[in-house]
Structure formats: structure tokens, C-alpha cells
Amino acid sequence: MALPLDKPPGAPPDPLEGAAATQLGGPLTLLLSITCALAVANIYFAQPLLNSIAQSLEVAPATVGLLVAATQGGYALGLLFIVPLGDLVQRKALILAQLLLSALALAVAGAAQQWPALLGGMFLVGLLAVVVQVVVAYAAALAAPGQRGRVVGTVTSAVVLGILLARFTAGLIADLAGWRAVYFVSAGLMLVLAAVLGKAVPATDVPRLQGSYMALMRSVFGLFIREPALRLRGLFALLAFAAFSVLWTSMVLPLSAPPLSLSHTQVGLFGLAGIAGALAASRAGRWADQGLGQRVTGIALALLTLSWVPSAFAEVSLLALVAGVIILDFAVQAVHVTNQSLLFAARPGAQSRLLGAYMCFYSAGSALGAAAATQVYSRWGWPAVCLLGAVISGTAWLLWWWLCARAHENEQA
């Protein structure tokens, strides 16, 4: 009942992996994970700081939201036009360059005295934050075939931790030293990471795509056409992260409204509940290494659908919401880790291009889920939001079930 990109245990080594595939140990995996967590946080720092930024620069509250859009816009462009460079140039050099430029962009954002300067700085912060995806592809290239899923799961879990903790950390630093300090501190951390990585990580020397940058970009767009597995796994990601965004975008609305009336700090603590699910999802990479990727996908999508049942009781039971958050985060990250593991195993020579193309589905799903959630809540309330999330999740599971049934029929023919 195998679908595209399944790789059974005992499959032969990837032809494009040589000695580099044995260089990834525990300390280096931890270092790359820390890099991902700190780098991805740069995208989400602004969300709890918008009010302070608006007051500081005398910007209208309705306008200051453009900071988030500018950051996400830069990130989307980086996925398409920077991440694929990992298949053309040495990934270590690319990572170090992005970290150094990120430090500069963060310093510009922190020092900005005018709104246009801050907007431009945040666009560059988002553009360069795709170093996270370059690091994920780099870790996959360094890992031996039998450990790739585990490594991808570990690094991806660190990305989720960075996202979940970014809002809390930004608020804490801003309370102590102002919103500008958040970006100056992060700029310093990027410089430290560049120095440590420059000393600690090896420079891989594996066969790469031959040709120009334009040829590279043509091959990226060609992957959407030639790789049905990319489209399939991308569709799973789009639906899963749409459901993820439906919950996290709209959850603050019922929690902040009577009778709960939680503060922003109290609402932010729900992000800590998501950490448990994110950490558990790292196990999904090990299962993918054992040839269980399709089974994990199906179970995770079923759990994603069921997670909306306890979440629907958020207005009467916070414990029920915590349970829903943990289940949803585990399910989404399990799908995400499995998707990446299977894609990397199938095309080791195109890992950066595949990841950039795949993450476009991720971004589209997140944006669509956020837009739909706020509209549905404003019209019909929290129960309708949960129904929307369950429908999106159930659609993903039905797609998986249909594909498995069709693959089974083909095996019987």
C-alpha cells in the first residue's frame, strides 16, 4: 500500500551521499537545532510588540499590522529564490552569509526611527529567515540515510519551539528594555551563531546541480510539474497548516472575551502546551526511517481531525483546549516531519529545491487558514471555527485514505 516517496527499511544508500552522510552527531544536531529555533523566532517577534511599535513611531494601529505582512512576504520570496541556492552553492557558506546579513537586517529594524525604514528592515528579516530551511536541508544532507528522519524530526521540532517561544521571549525583553532591544539582542545572537557554526560545522562537498542561477530556478518550478509526490505531500502540508493556523489565529478571540477574559500573557502561555506536542512529533522522523511514513501520515491526520472535539469546549473548559492544542500540534508536526523525510529520501540531490517548493504549500496553507478563521469567528463564533478546522483536517485524512485505497487496488491488479 505504498504511495510515492515511501522508502522501505534496508533500501540502498542514496547515490548522492558520500562521506558527508556520516558527519552528523548529537552535538552538531543540537547546534543546528538551536540555530533553527533562534532564526525562526525573528519572524514572530513583532506580533506581541505591535502596540509598542505603533506608539513609538506614531503609526496607526491599523497600519502597524503591515509589519507582519512585510515579514511574511519576505519569507515567502526567500523560500522560492534563496532556499534553492543550497543545491547550487556550498550550504555552509550560504548559512553563514544569511546569518551575518540577518544580524544587519535586525540591527536596521531595531534602530529604525521612521516607519518606512522599519518596514524595509522587517522585509529583509523575513527574507533572510529562510536560513532555517537551508539548515534543515543541510542537516538532511549530513545525516546518514538511516538517521535522516530522526534528524529532520529533531531540527523541525526546534523550529516549532522557536515559533512557540518567540512571542513570550519578545514580550519579556520588551518589558525589561523596550521593543528595540528585542531586535538588537537577536542581532547579537545571529553573530554568535555565525561564529560558532563557522568553527563547528563541516563544509559538505556533494554533487550539485550544474548550471546558472536561472537554470536552478527553472528546475524549482519544474519540480512542481514533474514531481507528483511533491504535489501530494505539499497538499497534505497545505491542509494541515491551514488547520494549524485556524486554531492559533482565532484562539485568542474567545479566550480574551467574557466570561474568560484572559490577559495577553495568559493567552500566550497556551503556546507552552503546544511544546509537548511538538517535542513528541520528533518521534515521527524515526518512524519514517523505518518505512512507516504513510501509516504515520494517516494516523496523524486522523488525530488532527479528532483534536477539534476537545478544542470546541474552549469556552467552558481550558483543560479541554489544552488537550486539543497538544493533539493538534503533535499531529501537524508529525505530518510535516514525515513529509520532509520522504521528500529528502527520494531526491537527495535536490533537497534545497524540494524544501523551498514544499514550504510554499506550508505558507499558502497558513495564510488561508488565518484569513478564513477570523472571518468565520466574526460571523458565527468559536463553534464554527472548530467546525472549519475539522472539515479541513477531515478532508486531508480522506485524501490520504483515497490514495491508499487506490494504491492497494493497483497492487491487486
Image (cartoon, rainbow, N blue to C red):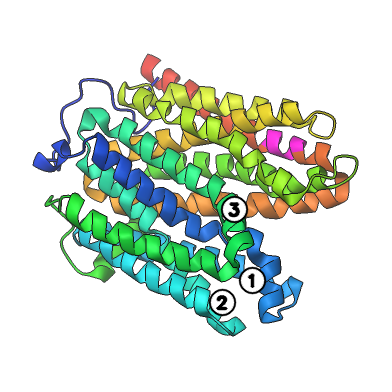
Q: In x, y percent, where is residue 304?
A: 61, 30
The foreground one among 54 and 303 is 54
Q: In the picture shown, does residue 144 fall above or below 113?
A: above
From the image, tell me which residue sits under label 1. 66
Residue in the image at 59% along x and 38% along y = 272
Q: Amino acid at mark 3?
A: Arg
Q: In x, y percent, where is residue 356?
A: 38, 54
Residue in the image at 44% along x and 19% along y = 409
Mark sitting on residue 167: 3
Asked if residue 148 lies left or right of residue 317, the reply is left
The foreground one among 269 and 205 is 269
Q: Earlier in the sequence, mark 1 or mark 2?
A: 1
Q: Amino acid at mark 2?
A: Leu
Q: Quadrant of the N terminus?
A: top left
Q: Is residue 325 magenta?
A: no
Between the residue at mark 1 and the residue at mark 2, the CA separation in whole angstroms equals: 8 Å
Q: Residue furthest right?
A: 259
Q: In the picture shown, does residue 124 fall above or below 166?
A: below
Q: Quadrant of the C terminus?
A: top left
Q: In x, y percent, where is residue 284?
A: 42, 27
Q: Which residues are magenta?
A: 386-391
Q: Amino acid at mark 1?
A: Leu
Residue in the image at 85% along x and 40% along y = 260
From the image, tell me which residue sits under label 2. 119
Q: In the picture shown, does residue 127 fall above or below 347?
A: below
Q: Residue furthest top?
A: 412
Q: Earlier in the sequence, mark 1 or mark 3?
A: 1
Q: Are marks 1 and 2 in contact (CB under 8 Å)?
A: yes
Q: In the structure shown, which secondary structural element does the residue marked by tag 2 occupy?
A: helix
